[in-house]
Image (spheres, helix red, strand yellow):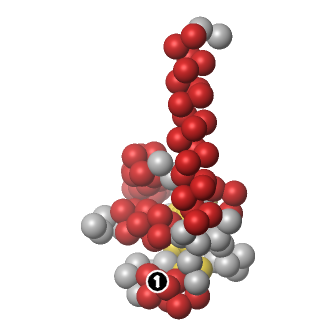
Amino acid sequence: MKPGNVRSKLKAERIQEKLKAERIQSKLGTGRIDELLAEVPGWEVAEDGRSLRRVYELPTLRAAGLFVQLATEVGEAAGQVPDVDLRYLEVTLTVAGAANEGLAETDFRLARMLDGRP
């Protein structure tokens, strides 16, 4: 492996560790989760209690595919890519942070971004 690639990989690993540590420190309680859910209509806490989920219905398969592409690009820009389940015209996005440590503010921020909200 080239030295530049090793440095890039190590830098990416350090960033991921820092993000994970921030998430663990910022796990939310039930009251705060309820407050933040009010800010992201259509999203719900998944059965596991550690992730957010929303189902989008798109008019065509092409629109669904483009939506998936956009959702992954938004997630990559935010440093947290959602899980995507595409079933014909239905796209389910699941947002869960590093190692599923519990919901954090960053999960709700990504949900807002995926909805095109500030």
- In the rendered image, residue 96, in percent from the top left (x then y), is placed at 60, 63
- The residue located at (53%, 91%) in the rendering is 31
- In the rendered image, residue 19, in percent from the top left (x then y), is placed at 54, 51
Nearer to the camera, 72 or 80 = 80
Judged from this view, the residue extending furthest toward the top is: 2
Nearer to the camera, 27 or 108 = 27
Note whether residue 65 is visible.
Answer: no
> Is 46 drawn above or below residue 88 in the view shown?
below
Q: Which residue is the site of mark 1?
A: 37
Note whether residue 46 is visible.
Answer: yes
**Secondary element type, mark 1:** helix
| Residue 13 lies in quadrant | top right
> Is 2 drawn above or below residue 71 in the view shown?
above
- In the rendered image, residue 74, in percent from the top left (x then y), is placed at 40, 51
Query: In the image, is 80 to the left or to the right of 109?
Result: right
Q: Amino acid at mark 1?
A: Leu
Nearer to the camera, 21 or 49 = 21
Which image quarter is the N terminus in? top right
> Is 95 drawn above or below residue 81 in the view shown?
below
Which image quarter is the C terminus in? bottom left
Query: In the image, is 80 to the left or to the right of 118?
Result: right
- The residue located at (68%, 65%) in the rendering is 101
Badge 1 local density, few (<14 within 10 Å), some, or many (20+)?
some
